[in-house]
């Protein structure tokens, strides 16, 4: 599985996870709004959306080309295409003003690069409960960035799962913490995870705690029937 951000859901989840205020986030919101408005049924792939956008408005994509595209009232769903185009034009204008970048492809790449940094740290958010030492857990605290093995009930395979604690640097035996989890083998678990799923994290054969998935960030991991019902 490619580690790059390629689908709407993953970028959307990463932007929603971002609590800071900055222009790249504003640009990302405009791009996501455009992609959400684009009238291709169940559009998910970013590259497909960009290709269709350029086929309709012209390439290279510019504010002038978007503004000059005439409305064809006989064309089905044309209004939604122009609604999406307006968001893209606003994105280009904002980037030109605040980021000194007017090239659509470079603006989009800057967005994907920025959120790609966060994507390198998280596939899902989980609540982690560490066992006490008396329950067989660790004897020492775990540091943020700790990489125990993750074991889901439905699979024999274990994978490394990096834990980036939210709001803490250290977690002591017996404590509970929310964390960003990045697993080593996401391709193996594609379309198999869902919110509320419980799992174990281990050191070798020793179970040192349990996790509960609170939110899927990497959309490719989410089990289809759960995603469709959200």
Image (cartoon, helix red, strand yellow):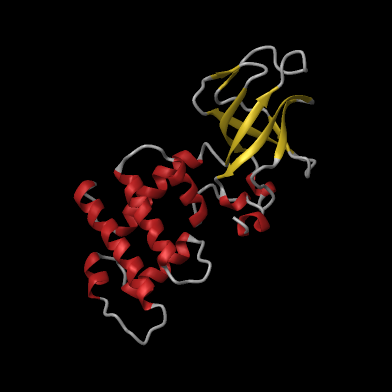
Coordinates of residue 189 in the picture (x, y in percent): 68, 47
Coordinates of residue 173 in the picture (x, y in percent): 66, 16
Q: On the picture, is 206 further left or further right than 162? A: right
Q: On the picture, is 83 further left or further right than 99? A: right
Q: Residue at x 38, y 62 (%)?
A: 34
Q: Residue furthest front?
A: 230
Front-lying residue, 206 or 160:
206
Instruction: Tell me the quarter of the image containing the C terminus.
Output: bottom right
Q: Is residue 48 above or below residue 21?
A: below
Coordinates of residue 147 in the picture (x, y in percent): 63, 28
Q: Residue at x 67, y 42 (%)?
A: 196
Q: Is residue 18 above or below residue 111?
A: above
Q: Quadrant of residue 76?
A: bottom left
Front-lying residue, 203 or 210:
210
Coordinates of residue 67 in the picture (x, y in percent): 23, 71
Q: Residue at x 26, y 65 (%)?
A: 62
Figure label count: 0
Q: Residue at x 61, y 55 (%)?
A: 227
Q: Residue furthest bottom?
A: 74
């Amino acid at each position: 599985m490619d580690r790059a951000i390629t689908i709407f859901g993953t970028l959307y989840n990463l932007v929603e996870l971002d609590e800071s205020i900055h222009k790249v986030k504003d640009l990302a919101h405009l791009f996501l709004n455009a992609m959400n408005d684009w009238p291709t049924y169940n559009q998910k792939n970013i590259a497909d959306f960009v290709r269709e956008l350029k086929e309709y408005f012209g390439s290279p994509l510019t504010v002038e080309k978007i503004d000059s595209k005439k409305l064809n009232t006989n064309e089905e769903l044309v209004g939604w295409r122009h609604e999406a185009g307006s968001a893209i034009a606003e994105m280009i204008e904002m980037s030109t003003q605040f980021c000194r970048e007017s090239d659509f492809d470079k603006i989009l790449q800057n967005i994907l690069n920025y959120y790609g940094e966060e994507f390198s740290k998280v596939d899902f958010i989980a609540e982690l409960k560490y066992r006490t030492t008396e329950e067989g857990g660790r004897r020492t605290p775990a540091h943020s960035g700790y990489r125990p093995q993750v074991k889901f009930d439905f699979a024999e395979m274990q994978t490394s799962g990096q834990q980036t604690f939210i709001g803490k640097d250290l977690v002591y035996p017996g404590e509970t913490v929310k964390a960003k989890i990045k697993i080593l083998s996401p391709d193996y678990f594609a379309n198999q995870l869902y919110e509320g799923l419980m799992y174990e994290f281990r050191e070798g054969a020793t179970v040192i705690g349990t996790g509960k998935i609170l939110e899927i960030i990497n959309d490719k991991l989410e089990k289809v029937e759960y995603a469709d019902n959200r």
